[in-house]
């Protein structure tokens, strides 16, 4: 071996390069908010442990691993083992956060999450990277139906955070939640958006981020960021838009959402997920149960396997970009 | 330490109680219990570090019945040890009863982990062993596997990680009773050589006659001291349906009910 290793100044750990970001150019971001939040939580709570299935670097778990090496468990490329072992740890009294990509958690390890974590209602916290369409790698990595898969699992709490602010606030609340949880992880340079609003993440609660008299957008995950951007742009069209953020998909805060939908404003749901089995159908089922008898327009991914490509191109193609959201809202008015 | 004769009585008790509970339910997995009756007796009455008065004692030995369909044989043992009133067993499989075909950790004192879907227990055991080590405990985590279950690839993910982490306090017992539902394991999907496979995965291996109580006790005694670094497996060669001639190594008796004369015949045979 030849060559030298350049000494580097201590710096805040970030996600490795080569990972596409959905942040807009110049947008404020925070690096690896999940990893830092988990490491901070573990400073205060000795029960917290972290596991991953050879995806520590790409799920920001490496930040925790560096801060708490004695409480980090690398389980190798074995997702069923990852979650089975996490359940065993929870039974003994630990609070595990186990990370992999959402596709592997939802598709590959379902039986283990269902029977080892959810049925015994153990405090196993699933951390799924690349939820919905947040990678251009194609169907093997795009978890477009993860919420549809997980919503049917009793006892499981599902959180779809918007930004770094949501993630930082959610991590300790997920740990405090008695049963199993699923976090749709945004990793790497994660946009920082919600600190500009009078809002604090509360597990199980939806929040009205802004009021508006013509349209109400009900959104979760990164689509709340797009909804807020779209609302600003629609103001230029003299369309007054409200945004309701629903970061907890299950249990769903139907009371807040139904209160906002019980008007004659155009109602639109926005989700980074197929329109099958996610936020739209959650909202629709509550609308029907409540007998509201009104239309709701879904903005989300189509019921198909998506193309590979550059993420901004794909968001445009499949209707998640702010431009497309504005277009769809205008077309629905 | 109970005598071999006393343990043999406990194994007989496991079998007869299984037959009795099967009659209550109208169906049950008796033959898969009969193959591990001596294993359960030897573990629960001579080996596991337990305190039935404190089922949640953090440093108790854990027992994960990965072959959860044998729970019908575990419940009477837990009742006999004092985890709950034996009279409660009469509710077996009735609506609302905690005692179902597969064990429920949330509702039955003494059950350390729920099971039913095969191939889960060893991964759960890995987590329990890692957590025990982190907590500074020296509890052992025992996992009872079937030989048909070894076809589940998950077993081998777990076996890999156990040796990677040097989990010497993880002990698997394979109830190698030779039969699955569709026939002999060797025909359905061969699992042998079980001992060589685990050895290749970095485990310490012993192989014994799983109906020979002194041999089982000797295998337990031969385990490395707690705190070791090599996971251990005891491959117990057994006979599915052991103790009832018509059931032994017969693929026709995996689950079902005993009616009329069959019921009396089986109890008479087990009483011999």
Image: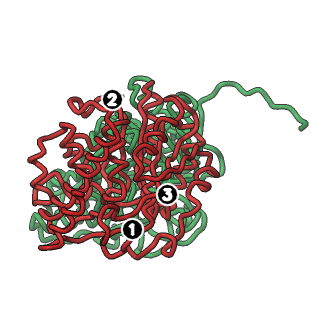
Rendering coords of residue A218 (x, y %): 28, 57
Tags 2 and 1 both on a single chain: no
Q: Colour of chain A?
A: green
Which residue is under mark 1? A274
Question: Which chain is mark 2 on?
Answer: B
Q: Are tags 2 and 3 found on a single chain?
A: yes
Vertical order, B8 against A264 (above or below): above
In x, y percent, where is residue A320? 44, 63
- Secondary structure category for the residue under label 2: loop
Q: Colour of chain B?
A: red
Q: Which residue is mark 2?
A: B58
Q: Residues within 10 Å of mark 2 (few under 14, many from 20)?
A: some
Please report the residue visible at 48 percent of the width from the left and 62 percent of the height from the top. Answer: B152
- The answer to which image quadrant residue B69 occupies is bottom left
Q: Which secondary structure lies at badge 3?
A: helix
3D distance between C-alphas at marks 3 and 1: 30 Å
Residue A54 rendering spot, x and y as whole percentages: 58, 48
Q: Is mark 2 in CB contact (under 8 Å) with mark 1? A: no
Residue A211 appears in the rendering: no
Instruction: Please report the residue visible at 14 percent of the width from the left and 73 percent of the height from the top.
Output: B261
- Dot 3 corresponds to which residue? B154
**Mark 3 against mark 1, which lies toward the viewer?**
3
Q: Nearer the viewer, residue A263 or B25?
A: B25
Can you say whether A188 is above or below A65 in the image?
Answer: below
Q: Nearer the viewer, residue B10 or B166?
A: B10
């Amino acid at each position: 071996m030849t060559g030298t290793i350049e000494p580097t100044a201590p710096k805040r750990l970030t996600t490795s390069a080569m990972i596409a970001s959905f942040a807009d150019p110049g947008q404020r971001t925070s690096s690896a908010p999940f990893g830092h939040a988990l490491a901070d939580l573990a400073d205060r709570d000795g029960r917290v442990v972290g596991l991953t299935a050879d995806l520590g670097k790409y799920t920001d778990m490496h930040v925790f691993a560096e801060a708490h090496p004695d409480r980090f468990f690398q389980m190798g490329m074995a997702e069923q083992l990852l979650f089975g072992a996490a359940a065993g740890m929870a039974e003994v009294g630990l609070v595990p956060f186990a990370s992999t990509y959402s596709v592997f958690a939802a598709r590959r390890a379902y039986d283990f999450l269902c029977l080892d974590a959810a049925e015994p209602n153990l405090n196993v916290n699933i951390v799924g990277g690349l939820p919905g369409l947040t990678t251009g790698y194609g169907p093997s990595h795009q978890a477009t139906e993860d919420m549809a898969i997980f919503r049917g699992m009793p006892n499981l709490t599902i959180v779809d955070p918007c930004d770094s602010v949501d993630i930082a606030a959610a991590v300790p609340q997920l740990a405090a939640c008695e049963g199993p949880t699923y976090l749709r992880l945004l990793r790497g340079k994660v946009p920082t958006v919600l600190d500009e609003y009078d809002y604090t993440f509360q597990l199980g609660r939806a929040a009205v981020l802004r009021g508006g008299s013509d349209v109400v957008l009900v959104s979760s995950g990164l689509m709340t960021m797009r909804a807020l951007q779209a609302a600003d742009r629609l103001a230029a069209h003299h369309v007054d838009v409200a945004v309701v953020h629903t970061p907890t998909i299950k249990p769903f805060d139907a009371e807040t959402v139904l209160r906002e939908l019980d008007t004659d404003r155009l109602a639109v749901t926005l989700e980074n997920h197929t329109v099958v089995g996610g936020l739209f159908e959650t909202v629709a089922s509550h609308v029907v149960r409540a007998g509201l008898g009104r239309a709701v327009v879904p903005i989300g991914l189509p019921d198909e396997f998506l193309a590979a490509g550059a993420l901004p191109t794909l968001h445009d193609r499949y209707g998640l970009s702010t431009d497309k959201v504005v277009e769809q809202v205008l077309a629905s008015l | 330490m109970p005598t071999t004769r006393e343990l043999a009585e406990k194994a007989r008790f496991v079998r007869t109680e299984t037959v009795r509970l099967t009659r209550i339910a109208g169906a049950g997995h008796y033959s898969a219990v009969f193959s591990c009756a001596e294993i359960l007796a030897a573990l629960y009455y001579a080996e596991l570090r337990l305190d039935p008065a404190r089922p949640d004692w953090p440093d108790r030995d854990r027992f994960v019945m990965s072959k959860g369909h044998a729970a019908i044989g575990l419940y009477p043992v837990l009742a006999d040890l004092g985890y709950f009133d034996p009279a409660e067993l009469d509710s077996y499989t009735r609506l609302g009863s905690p005692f179902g075909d597969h064990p429920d950790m949330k509702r039955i004192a003494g059950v350390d982990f729920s099971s039913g879907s095969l191939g889960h227990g060893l991964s759960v055991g890995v987590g329990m062993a890692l957590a025990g080590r982190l907590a500074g405990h020296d509890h052992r985590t025992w996992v009872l596997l079937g030989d048909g279950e070894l076809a589940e690839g998950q077993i081998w993910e777990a076996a890999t990680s156990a040796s990677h982490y040097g989990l010497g306090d993880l002990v698997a017992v394979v109830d190698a009773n030779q039969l699955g539902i569709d026939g002999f394991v060797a025909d359905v999907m061969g699992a042998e050589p079980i001992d060589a496979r685990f050895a290749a995965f970095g485990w310490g291996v012993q192989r014994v006659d799983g109906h020979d109580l002194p041999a089982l006790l000797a295998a337990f005694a031969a385990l490395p001291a707690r705190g070791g670094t090599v996971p251990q497996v005891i491959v117990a060669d057994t006979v599915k349906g052991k103790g009832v001639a018509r059931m032994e190594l017969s693929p026709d008796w995996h689950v079902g009910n005993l009616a009329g004369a069959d019921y009396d015949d089986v109890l008479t045979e087990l009483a011999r």
